[in-house]
Amino acid sequence: MEKIRPICTIRTAVAGTESVSCFVTSIDAFDNSERYSRVFFYNELNENVWTYTEQNDRITSVCVWSDPYNQPNRVFAALSENGEVIFLGPNQSGEKIGDSGLSSDSKGYGYLNCIVQIGHHLFACGYSGQVYRRSSTGIWHHFDSSILQTSDSTEPKYFIESMNGCSENDIYCVGSTSEPGYPGRADYWNGKHWTKLDLPIDTGRLTNLYIESHEKIWLCGANGTLLCGNVNDGFIKVKVKYLNSLITSVTKFQECLFLATSKGIFYFDPRISDPVLMQVITNLQPPQLTDTLIVQSVEGYLWSIGSKKITRFDGKIWESIQHPDIPNIK
């Protein structure tokens, strides 16, 4: 008798190349509090296109890690909410970010949300203003002097949701504070110290950012929040007609800005004054992509990754990629 495969939901993902991606999933039959993740690898170049590994923790983020000290070692690096870092290469290995998380040996700062490579180092960030940088020897150190909130801190808690930068001396962190409405907050590292950025007064909770260039940093979040600017010129709210939903991811593809939102995937041309938001219409069935958490442009392809649907666009044709543990439900 054939075993029934479990049904998965994608929590987060990253595209490594046009044909290789990593997907972090949960099992629908498990309780939401279950400390378990199933990490899938999609590789069109392999005989077995889909493979997976199981982790006894909740993975919150995954990125591509190109180790400059061990070329040509390029693997996926996954981060758990309690600060476990897993290098998902042929020889899987792990590390612990000492003070992070809410385990018995942590400092109680809270969970971690994001892992990313900037320059030659890996960085991780999370609740209470936590930011860590990994050394070349695999040791994680605090990188959050002046923004880390200890137990005696009286200011509203700072929940960093994402970070990225043009270089290791040009880094942005975004998130929100524990005040009514969860207003957005962003901080900037210039190589010497952190600076809290001035944002428009009605900035909603910030969920993500996209680095287009040193001059154009896009910040996105709740209630249609979309900001563009940089630390020197400041950030302005980008006014796009019909944009009022939660934005979880932003990327640029073929001169247009694509947005993953709670209502689907949309795009607009930022070169046009007073731009209008357009919904993506595909050659698939149904033609609208309503399930999108992440949009990412890699090697001339646009990836759209949702909780139950994976699609890819080469600039002309949209292609649906069927996950082995997610039923093809239209």
Image (cartoon, grey):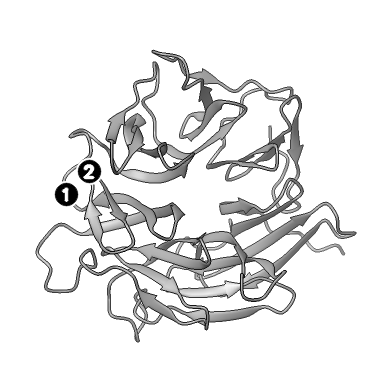
Residue for badge 1: 179
Q: Quadrant of the N terminus?
A: bottom right
Q: Tell me the quarter of the picture where residue 301 sits.
A: top right
- The outermost residue toward the left is 154
**Disc number for residue 183:** 2
In the shown orientation, is residue 58 left or right of residue 4?
Answer: left
Q: Tell me the quarter of the picture where residue 133 sits.
A: bottom left
Residue positioned 23% across, 63% down in the render: 147
Residue positioned 75% across, 24% down in the render: 316
Q: Secondary structure at mark 2?
A: loop
Q: Secondary structure at mark 1?
A: loop
Instruction: Give how far across and how far down residue 310 sits, in percent.
Output: 67, 42
Image vertical order of residue 69 relative to residue 299, above or below: below
Instruction: Give how far across and how far down residue 206 sits, in percent.
Output: 33, 44
In the shown orientation, is residue 230 left or right of residue 320?
Answer: left
Between residues 264 and 207, which one lies in front from this camera angle? 207
Tag 2 near tag 1, CB within 8 Å: yes
Image vertical order of residue 306 relative to residue 268, above or below: below
Instruction: Give how far across and how far down residue 180 sits, in percent.
Output: 16, 45
Q: Is residue 188 visible?
A: yes
Mark 2 to mark 1: distance in Å?
7 Å
Which amino acid type is shown beneath numbered disc 1? Glu
Which amino acid type is shown beneath numbered disc 2? Pro
Between residues 313 and 190, which one lies in front from this camera angle? 190
Q: Tell me the quarter of the picture where residue 300 sits.
A: top right
Q: Residues within 10 Å of mark 1 (few under 14, many from 20)?
A: few
In the shown orientation, is residue 91 left or right of residue 117?
Answer: right
Between residues 292 and 148, which one lies in front from this camera angle? 148
